[in-house]
Image (tube, rainbow, N blue to C red):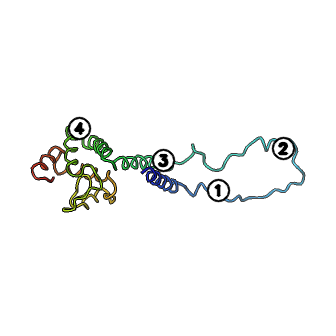
């Protein structure tokens, strides 16, 4: 688990780093005239040349472009998403992520989350790998057909956050609240 997290994180970092390198930062070959010395430099001239470091010709961290700042922000967002996905692979983590998303995106409080928790515990026990062999329903929200979740992301088979995002949106559009979806489930064994 930790190894997978490190590999995914390293790959994300490497991808973002490589896409942020700009060709303009490469140092061109020096061109110009060459001056031949007829006599050796004096001691004072040598001391002055050694004590005065030349300015670097490449950009320093403070001089980096706005593009680099945006890429750093993107890298942070990727890191946060990777952390949420890894957290949601376990049922307790999935509950925590769903609770946060339900509150943040839909304004659903504790009462609505209690209904959502009951509903998805009955459907999948918060297991993102859950699949109903009889119907083909898949994931935490038990989407049927499972390919419906592609409107959120093509990684719906392996990404619990994609499944949660789709499930919350589905409940909002179809039933308005998780408690109404749970009431429908209690009447018909599906929602």
Judging depth in this view, the residue of 121 and 47 nearest the camera is: 121
Say which mark, if any, is on residue 72: 3
- Which residue is under mark 4? 109
Disc 1: CA contacts within 10 A as few (<14), some (14-19) or many (>=20) = few
Secondary structure at numbered mark 1: loop
Mark 3 vs mark 2: give the one in front.
3
Labels 4 and 2: the sequence-earlier one:
2
Is residue 65 or residue 84 the one in the foreground? 84
Find the distance from the CA under tag 3 to the CA under tag 4: 33 Å
In space, the residues marked 3 and 1 are separated at their CA atoms by 23 Å
Sooner in the amino-acid sequence: mark 3 or mark 1: 1
Drawn side of residue 179 relative to residue 29, left or right: left
List the residue tagged with mark 2: 45
Q: Residue 44 lies in what quarter of the image?
A: top right
Residue 38 figure quarter: bottom right
Q: CA distance from mark 1 to mark 4?
A: 56 Å
Front tag of 1 and 4: 4
Coordinates of residue 128 in the picture (x, y in percent): 29, 53
> Dot 3 lies on which element?
helix
């Amino acid at each position: 688990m930790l190894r997978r997290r490190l590999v995914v994180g390293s790959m994300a970092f490497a991808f973002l780093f490589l896409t942020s390198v700009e060709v303009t930062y490469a140092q061109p070959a020096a061109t110009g005239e060459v001056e031949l010395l007829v006599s050796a430099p004096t001691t004072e001239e040598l001391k002055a040349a050694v004590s005065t470091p030349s300015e670097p010709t490449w950009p320093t961290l403070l001089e980096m472009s706005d593009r680099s700042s945006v890429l750093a922000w993107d890298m942070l967002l990727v890191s946060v998403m990777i952390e949420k996905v890894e957290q949601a692979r376990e049922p307790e983590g999935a509950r925590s992520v769903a609770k946060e998303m339900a509150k943040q995106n839909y304004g659903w409080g504790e009462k609505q989350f209690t209904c959502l928790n009951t509903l998805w515990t009955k459907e999948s026990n918060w297991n993102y790998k859950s699949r109903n062999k009889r119907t083909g329903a898949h994931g935490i929200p038990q989407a049927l057909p499972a390919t419906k979740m592609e409107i959120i992301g093509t990684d719906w088979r392996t990404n619990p956050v994609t499944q949660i995002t789709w499930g919350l949106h589905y409940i909002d559009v179809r039933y308005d609240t998780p408690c109404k979806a749970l009431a429908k489930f209690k009447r018909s064994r599906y929602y």
